[in-house]
Image (cartoon, rainbow, N blue to C red):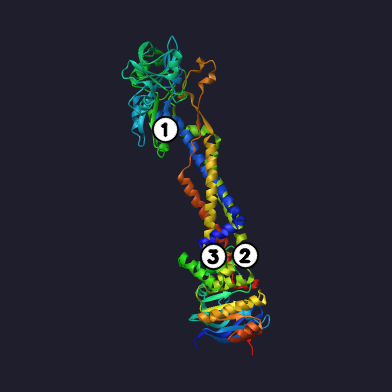
Amino acid sequence: MNKIITVKHLSKTLGDVRIINDVSFDVEKGEFVAIQGPSGSGKTTLLALLAGLEKADAGSISVGQENLTSMSEDQLALFRRNNVGFVFQSFNLIPTLNVVENIALPLFPTRLRSSEVFDRSTTAAIDVGLAERLKHYPNQLSGGEQQRVAVARSLINNPQVIFADEPTGNLDTKTGEKIIELLRQLNKEKGQTFVLVTHDDRIAGESDRIIKIVDGRIGE
Amino acid sequence: MLNYAIKELLNRYRSYLLNVIVIGLVTAMVITLSFLGVAYKEAACLPFKDIHGTIIVQKNGNVPENVSGVLLSCSLAPIHQDAVTAISKIEGAQDISSALSLWVFDPDHFKRVVGVNWQDNYGKSLSSRVAEGAAPGTDQEILIDKTYAGKNGLRVGSQVTVAGSQFTVSGIIGMAGNEIVAADVYLNMSVAQDMAYQSKNLQAVERVDKTDVNLIFVNAGQQDLTLVTQKIKQNLNEQDTNAGQTPLGQTIGNYNIYTPDTFEDQISTMLKLSDKLTWIISLVLFIGVCLIIARNTLRVVLERRKEFGVLKAVGYTGRDIQKLIGMETILQVLAGFIVGLLLTGIAVFILSKTTVSIAIPWELSAYPHFLLANPDDANIVQTHFLPIRLELLPVVVTFLGVLIVGLVTALLSTWQINKLKPVEILKYE
């Protein structure tokens, strides 16, 4: 298998606290990886570093052909737009945009034609089971539906890797299972790499591999 | 992205309403002030429409000892042909017209008489207002004013005696009576000049030649007006170097030069105020727009901090977000500008129903007040509707001004977006 993510000696300090401490690991292309660890262990910070939302203090991260360590803020933004998708715990949809528009959000600043943008986002909405909710606004959707919109939004730019931070954290168990089922299905059908942070052992059990983080280090 | 900006504005219109209202009010005030300034300037030109010129030149003369027979109106002095020739040579002075305004104290009654060159602009202007008959074709024919004709039961073909000579009425002219150099009788210039030349009472106080006039009308374009007026003043001063004391002890040789500026000064203090204050008021209003847009944009940026964090997380650069805010600002400016134009339209409609009163200087509307029961009746006032109208240039300039001010202010107010790190969005988790 090919490596899609390579992390070497990664460190990140916030204030006086070293959140990530000399972490190194690889993720293979098409893998479904869970990052687990106790609260405050640094798993969300690690995910932010991998997704280019945060810059590391030391070490290196490569995603695909891109080396994130040397990128400026704007270069990181473009990297995120073109290479990664992100699913948040609390969905983070734009309240003034409907389902199709929320899914299309990452494509608005691109040079794609408006019709193509909306065709793609409509297809993505249908793919995640929201065919009946295309014109609905976030406040008209259930939590599970909102997270489906967030998942579709993370896939709209056809990324190499999708990062998810506690994607079921705000959902009930049954809905959470459906979301994980959806992510797994997408992983299998499209071969995209998924890296998700979770504290739920059942979800972690569904993954190909678990990376455990304890006090900013990779644990056993 | 435009769709996003539109939906943002529509869904949170309460947040942006203040911007739209402020832009609308400022636009309306700046454009209306601009229109008002132009309208007052145009109003000051309205009295000149009657003479088809923009500059009137007169020369002050001496009061005759004996007020009878033929006199120059208002004790004006004759202007000799060399002065007319000198003015006609001034660059920018176009279409020189002249007239000779006389007071004729005939035994039966008084008449205001004007000698006219029917081929010059002033003469053509009078000819165009002949309501009945035609302009005089011979020295024995005259044109009479409609009111004068009515009072005296005259019609085309009637005989009228002026300064002892018989004339036939060739036409009747429809004048309002408050025009510059309004008269009862209009006749050929050479006939009027001969009357003045023959007048002993007049010759007693002024040297009158057979070709003299006492009114010169100069047409100068708006751009050349000030320059031409200055040159006329310089020129006439040179011509007037021999000015001295008259037998009555009055200073002669002072020319009166009337331009639209003469009336601008008297139309209203509003013109002066609007002229001087337009820039200051506009500047203050634009600063107000800056402050309000900046305050509102900052508030909205803070409110949307989480949203902008999401945008950055999904791949928006700082410039992309500024572009989004720029679009939102342009849409607000457009909405505010449309509101402003509507308000301007209402203001212009109301102002167009107001009138301006322009007092015509006595020397230009001469009637001997000592002949009137009420001397104040000699004071002529023209009343015009304010010629205010919508014009494109101030609208475009104001739009661009508001747009630039709005955009710069809004974009400067978003400086902290660049400092916003996308990871902060995770803090809201």
Secondary structure under tag 1 reads loop
Of labels 1 and 2, the one closer to you: 2
Left or right side of B231 for B427: right
Q: Amino acid at mark 1?
A: Thr
Q: Residue at x 50, y 15 (%)?
A: B371
Secondary structure under tag 2 reads helix
Q: Residue at x 48, y 32 (%)?
A: B262
For the question of whether residue A160 can be seen, the reply is yes
Secondary structure under tag 3 reads helix
Badge 1 local density, few (<14 within 10 Å), some, or many (20+)?
Answer: many
Q: Amino acid at mark 3?
A: Ile
Height in image: B13 above or below B149? below
- In whole angstroms, how far apart are the C-alphas of marks 3 and 1? 56 Å
Residue identified by numbered label 3: B321
> For the C terminus of chain A, which image quadrant?
bottom right
Residue identified by numbered label 1: B54
Q: Nearer the viewer, residue B133 or A1?
A: A1
- In whole angstroms, how far apart are the C-alphas of marks 2 and 3? 26 Å
Badge 3 local density, few (<14 within 10 Å), some, or many (20+)?
Answer: many
Height in image: B416 above or below B108? below
Residue identified by numbered label 2: A140
Q: Position of residue B375 (x, y in %)?
A: 53, 18
Q: Chain of mark 2?
A: A
Q: Going from the N terminus, do you reach mark 3 or mark 1 first?
A: 1
Height in image: B26 above or below A105? above
Q: Nearer the viewer, residue B82 or B69?
A: B69
Q: Residue furthest left?
A: B138
Q: Position of residue A172 (x, y in %)?
A: 67, 75
